[in-house]
Amino acid sequence: MRVIRLWLGFTWIYGGWDKATDPNFLGKEGATSLAKQLAGYSKTSPIGFLFQHLIERATIVGIVVMLSEFAIGIATILWIAPTFIAFTGFTMSLGLWLAATWHVKPYFLGSDTAYAVLWLAYLLALVGKRKKVELSLDRRGAIRLGGLGVSALIAILLGRSLAKSPVKTSTSATASANQILKVAELPVGKTHEFVTATGEPAVLFRTKNGVFAYSEICTHQGCTVAYSPADRTLVCPCHQSAFDPFKGARVLSGPAPAPLPKIKVAIKGDWIVLV
Ligand code: FES
C-alpha cells in the first residue's frame, strides 16, 4: 500500500508539474497544446462529443487538470482525505482512459488503463480497511483541504514562472470554409498548421511538386503530432511514433497502427484550399 501510495502521489505531482512548465500546454500551438489534444480526443474517443465542447474552454480545462493533479498527488502523499482522493484519482484515470487510451491495442500498452486499475485497487483496499467510507469533513479536514488547494495553486504558479517561451508555428484557422492560406504565404519547403472546418488540427506541406496535408491526430491514441524539420518526420510526443510526410505519412517507427489520414488540398488561383 505504501509503495502504491508513493508511486501514485509522485506520478500525479509530476504530471501537474510537467504541464505547468510546458509553455504550450495552455496555448493553441505546439504538439502538447491541450486544445489540440482535445480536438484529437473529440475524433477518437467514445465520448468525443464531450471534448468537442471543451476545445474552446481549453485554458480553463487545463488549469483544472493541473490543479487536480497537484492536489491529488500532494494529498495522496500527505494522507489527506485518502478515500475521497483515491476515488478522484480513479475517476481521472478512467476519464483519461476514455479520452486517450481507448483505441490502444493491445490494451496493456495503454498506461491510463493500468493507472485506473491501480487507483481502483488502492481505493478498495482503503475502503476495506476502514469498513465505512468517511466523506464528512471536520474543521481540521477543511483546513487541510484548503491548504492543499493553496499548495496546488502555488505549484502551478511556480511551474508557469519557470516555463520557457511557447513554440511559435505558422498557424491559422481556415480563412473561409475551404481557404487555408494564400500560396504566396507558404514558400516551397515550408509547412503550415491549420484547423479544418470540423476542428481537426492539420499540417500543410508545400514542395516543388505541389501541396499536400495530413491530419495531426496520431493514429495510435489521438495525441497531436508535430513536424520536425531536422528529421523531416512528423513525430508524436506521446509514444514517439514517427511518420514520413513525404511518403504518404507512413509509419516509420512507434506503436501507431496506420499512416496519418490525408487531407485533400489543392492550389486554386492565389489560394491553397481544402477540396
Ligand atoms: S498517441 Fe501514442 S504514438 Fe501517438
Image (cartoon, helix red, strand yellow):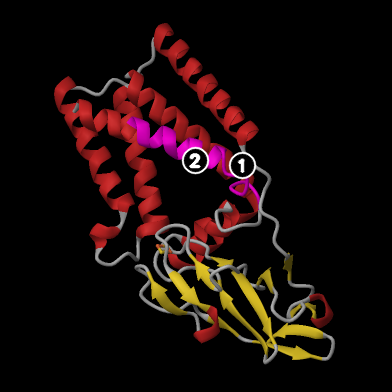
Q: Is residue 159 magenta?
A: no
Residue drawn at (42%, 56%) of the image: 99
Above/below status of 85 relative to 104:
above
Q: Is residue 202 left or right of residue 140?
A: right
Split into 4 quadrants, where in the image is the C terminus? bottom right
> Which residue corresponds to mark 2?
18
Of mark 1 and mark 2, the one earlier in the sequence is 2
Split into 4 quadrants, where in the image is the N terminus? top left
Residue drawn at (49%, 40%) of the image: 18
Percent coordinates x, y for residue 238 in the rendering: 43, 57
Percent coordinates x, y for residue 20 in the rendering: 56, 38
Q: Which mark is residue 89?
A: none
- Label 2, secondary structure: give it: helix
- Depth check: 107 or 209 in front? 209
Percent coordinates x, y for residue 166 in the rendering: 67, 49
**Residue 197 visible, this orientation:** yes
- Depth check: 259 or 59 in front? 259
Magenta residues, dominant SS class: helix
Foreground label between 1 and 2: 2
Q: Which residues are drawn in magenta? A: 9-27
> Which residue corresponds to mark 1?
60
